[in-house]
Amino acid sequence: MKKRMRRVLGAALSLVMAVGLLSGCSSYDPVKEVMGYSRSTVMFTVNGNDVTAGQFFFWMAQNADTVASYSQMSGSTEIDWSTPMGDDMTMDEYVKEQSKEAAVFYNVIESNAKEKGYSMTEEDQADYEEQVAQAQEQMGGAEAYELFLKKNCLTEEDMEEMSSVGVLYGHMLDGLFREGGEYAPTEEELTQYIQDEDLMYAKHILFMTMDPTTGAALSEEEAAEKKAAAEADLAALQAITDPVELAETFDKLMNEHSEDSGLADNPDGYLFTSGDMVEEFETATKELEPGQISDIVETTYGYHIILRLDPKNAPTLNSQWGEDQMGALVDQWVEEAEVVTSPEYDALTTADFYEKLSDYRETLEPTEDTTDAATEETTGEDVTTGEDAATGEDTTTGEDAATGEDTITGEDAATGQDESTSSEEGAETADGETTE
């Protein structure tokens, strides 16, 4: 349950960081337009700290939209918010509870960060301002972004505040768990962590027998050439008896011959646990002692030569340990938080909110009349005839729709790793690695 919640809320954190890029002063109040009360209305407190409607209803909109999307995919034209979700709540209650959990999650991170002295730095602000310019261009300008915010019951101030939580989280992670930090690991803790998580550490040289772009298997002749190349490297490595020379030669051959496209991001190898890699890779690694190399290991991705290493020497060990500990610490803060709801929260139902939100969103869409007027004003074209006022030429054309291209999958062709997947969910690489 803890891991599931951390994964869901971690994804929410990523979502806000992805879209919360613009800042500015907003005079509108979308919460008031939807619910009839101000965005400053307190929905509940967390350890005495206010969570306002402006901070809360973004999560309601996001979670309700997700449920609505699933409902539409199943063929339903109307959402039955009384549908059971598990044993003890309805869909209506589920959306409301998930939204409260997300808001509590953000609140405890922000309050604990401030209590421990963490804040946005000048460098953070400079990075933020650079992202503002990029976001304006990507979303089609400030008006398009403001429309997005309104549709999600947000102002720019609310989104900017929520986006800063991700920065504070990163500062705490770096500060609390680094050497000399409040929760810096001891050698004994890291040793125990390696044992508890069954961590293994290895490098590999991969000769792929599949097309990294299409995933199609290579021809028998091409696969045979790959195997021969792998056998040549293996023979060269097996002829070396000095451990230092073996490690150096392995690195040289890996950098020259390996077709693992994750190599650039993982030049020191992969730190992984049981179930992260494809079975053949994991089994072969477990049969080795640190410093030993495997025979040729065949997987669906190709031929591997594996060098097992001591996980204590993995450069990512401390950061992985810190991420796990930070996640557990935030879970503890959430579990120990005292949440006191307001009458507005208690009276709220998802069904009522989503109906009002949907009605409000309809008012934001441009009408045919306003679209035609804008066209005439900017182009001089008579939209009833398609005639250009200046030339008399018929300029009627078809509208070019947005592409809708999905650019967030981030799948690594050589490894199969979905780079957009959160570390908790685990994305399989060519050697089967998933990040936990």
Image: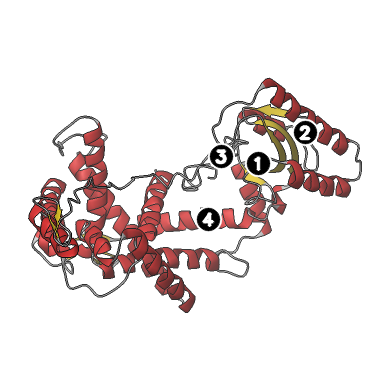
Q: Which residue is mark 2?
A: 294
The foreground one among 180 and 18 is 18
Residue 244 circle label = none
Looking at the rendered structure, the kind of residue marked 1 is Asp
* Front: mark 2 or 3: 3
Q: Is residue 370 left or right of residue 307?
A: left
Q: Which residue is mark 3?
A: 413
Identify the residue at image location x=65%, y=23%. Answer: 219
State which tag comes first along the sequence, 2 or 1.
1
- State the image coordinates of residue 284 (x, y, percent, origin top left): 71, 31
SS label for mark 2: loop
Q: Is residue 233 left or right of residue 432?
A: right
> How far separated are the C-alphas under marks 2 and 4?
31 Å
SS label for mark 3: loop
- State the image coordinates of residue 67 (x, y, percent, origin top left): 24, 41
SS label for mark 4: helix
Q: Which residue is mark 4?
A: 323
- Examine the rendered structure and indicate whether residue 269 appears above or below residue 39: above
Q: Which residue is mark 1?
A: 260
The residue positioned farthest toward the bottom in the image shown: 122
* Front: mark 1 or 4: 1
> How far separated are the C-alphas under marks 1 and 3?
9 Å
> How far separated are the C-alphas under marks 2 and 1?
17 Å
